[in-house]
Amino acid sequence: MTNKTNDITRTLIAVAIAFIIAVSSALVMGAVRADAATQKSVRATQKAASTQLPKQTTKKNRFAKAYTITVSGKTSKGYNWTYKTDYKNIKVNCKYNFKAHKYTFKITGTSYGLNHLTLKYKTSDKKWASVKMTLFVDSQNNIMRTA
């Protein structure tokens, strides 16, 4: 009878251990699935944040797809402007409003890096004005004016 009791005891212990292992595995798999879902959610949130950047900004220390600055100036022939940079990672475009006599510069990033830019524009036939700024372009070509 002792052998049958020992066999039954061993069987019960084996079943209990198998049950504990099964429950533990189920809990671990649930945690792994939850972690994967969390990581997917975090990536989606990061992607949404990067796509929700404004198309343009006029503020310092804010990322956007473009930085814009508007200044006044008028010459007898319309307008004249130029710029100088220390690194070729930006693109500068200008639209001039002939009625309001305003330059609107739109600066976009083309590659990662820090850039020091000097915009020069005519405020009258003989007078030039300049605006110095520091711009940072991130790896997605978003731009931010820092100074």
Image (spheres, rainbow, N blue to C red):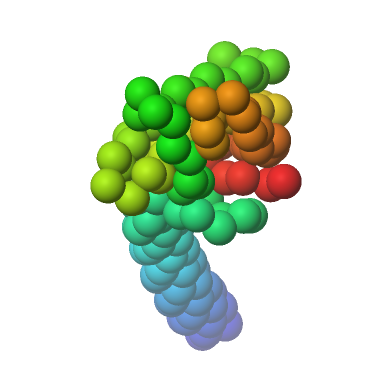
Work out whether 32 lies above or below 91: below
Find the residue positioned furthest to the left: 99
Q: Residue at x 33, y 35 (%)?
A: 95
Q: Is residue 18 visible?
A: no
- Residue drawn where x is 62% and y is 45% of the image: 145
So how many labels did they put on this image? 0
Observer-nearest of 117 and 19 = 117
Q: Position of residue 34 (x, y in %)?
A: 41, 68
**Residue in the foreground of this view, choosing between 13 and 37:** 37
Residue ID at (53%, 33%)? 124
How far from the left and from the top, in percent, is residue 117?
64, 28
**In the rendered image, is residue 60 in sight?**
yes
145 above or below 45? above
Locate residue 36, reporting x and y percent: 41, 58
Between 7 and 15, the one nearer to me in the picture: 15
Residue 125 percent across, percent down from the top left: 51, 26
Q: Is 41 or 33 nearer to us in this picture?
A: 41
Q: Quadrant of residue 83?
A: top right
| Image side of residue 6 versus residue 115, left or right | left
The residue located at (29%, 40%) in the rendering is 98
